[in-house]
Amino acid sequence: MDWRNELYQNKPIINRQEFTFGDRFIPKRFKPEAINYNLKYVGKTKEQDLLKMSLTQRSSYWRQSSFVSTMNKVFNIEENRLLQFSDMQCKYSRTGRQKTDSDWFCKPRARPVAFATTTNEMPELCTSFDLNMMDWSVNDQMALSFDENLIIWRNRDDTSMIFNVERTSSLKYSPNGKYLAIGCKDDENPVLEIWLLQSPKEFLIANGKYLPRSFESICCIEWSEDGEEILCGTRSGQIVVIQFSTMTIERVLRQHSKRICCMRFSPMRRYLATADIQGQIYIFDGVSYKVIMRLGAKQGGIVFDWHPWQAAELAISEKKLSSIYIFNVPRREIVSFYQRGDDKILINSITFSKITGELLVNIYKCDENGCPCCEIFVLSSLNRVVDILTHNNRGAIFMMWSPDGTKLAAAGMDESFSIWEFYPSDKLNSLNQKQTRRLRKRSTLELYGSIR
């Protein structure tokens, strides 16, 4: 486009107004016949689809974002935003959030440059990919299950262990990292095993629980934040709430009728969101487990994640046709959404960064040559791309976050496994120190600020 702007030549126009050039140098791109192709001087951005952007196209994001905020501030503009991206094959809408420049609360990185620090070979990773079969603990251990092999890898000292577990269907570390809950089967009975981490290289099966055969298998596991309860989503659609200390069944949630594919507690355990493969999403109270509402979505490929700061907002993605919704639970409405009109781009998963609030969208598409390609788009809004994580040869498939949110694990199309540096650890430490100093400076009289 730069070459075209500089060298584009058009047929001479009769009776056109000639520009006179003074002693300053003005390039040829300012000629009248080329002015329609000059985006810098005309001030129009090329309309494009969000999920079709490339690395070169999103490089103007920060200049554009600064321009919009400056213009709104100088001219006291209170509209939602000045510039929007659109396409004939997609829809974008937002409602209910005024005087902001984003669809959710977000603090994008000042220099969004993520890079891979470690890459290992992991055969058959893409063929047996399941987000419920991998997790990253606070002890810097990663657990991944393939067929009957359970791999425990420690990134800190590059040590790995392999265990043979029959018919593993799900796994999840406890919040404190001391236990690993594994869903497997013994004959025809689904079993929940609790492994105790004795040392960085030793595990002990500390406890277990047999579930009725009617539950078929444990497909999804979620711990409560205090580690006192374990939720097991089954293949038959029931959700079993187990008390960890006694390993007894407290209750069984029977709202779903199909296999559970995703379960998430909101921050501070305000809500619990669950989804099945049929597309039914239920929102429960996080403590009493009473049903608050039910949402209907398209069948297959439902993935969601709670905003790390706003426990009331839930991001939901659908695989076909690719859609992203930002749903506000207390208001019971969709505040913004993105939706495509074709199936050329599929969404594999979405997740929020717990540090910056950026939304990571993992997509699958075919490139210009028809070869499959996977990329991770980092969004600060449903019309703004901050960064794109990918490898030219192997792409990037999102797997899991590190517990502190500074790193993420991604798989490649060439059966590789990479650790990406998303947010520098030194910046996170300085950010935590600033927050600590800010809290210390607050006066004790502020405790009574809410009392009138």
Image (cartoon, helix red, strand yellow):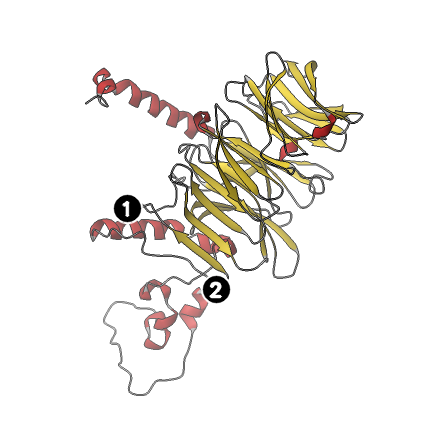
Image quarter hosting the N terminus: bottom left
Q: Could you tell me the amino acid type at mark 2?
A: Met
Image: 287 above or below 16: above
Residue located 52% across and 39% down the image: 304
Q: Mark 1, residues whose alpha carbon is within 10 Å: few (<14), some, or many (≥20)?
A: few
Say which quarter of the image contains residue 448: top left
User: In the rendered view, does 262 fall on the left or right side of 415?
Assistant: left
Q: What residue is pinned by disc 1?
A: 99
Image: 244 above or below 160: above
Residue 228: image x %, image y %?
54, 16
Task: Quote the CA–CA distance across marks 1 and 2.
Answer: 27 Å
Q: Which mark is residue 82?
A: none
- Look at the image and tell me whether residue 195 can be seen: yes
Residue 356: image x %, image y %?
42, 36
Image: 324 above or below 282: below
Residue located 25% across and 53% down the image: 71
User: In the rendered view, does 382 fall on the left or right side of 170?
Assistant: left
- Look at the image and tell me whether residue 376 can be seen: no
Q: Residue placed farthest to the left in the image?
A: 452
Q: Could you tell me the amino acid type at mark 1?
A: Lys
Q: What residue is pinned by disc 2?
A: 88
Image quarter hosting the C terminus: top left
Residue in the foreground of this view, choosing between 98 and 379: 98
Residue located 42% across and 28% down the image: 428
Say which quarter of the image contains residue 10: bottom left
Image: 187 above or below 203: below
**Element at label 2:** loop
User: In the rendered view, does 196 fall on the left or right side of 445?
Assistant: right
Residue in the foreground of this view, choosing between 396 and 286: 286
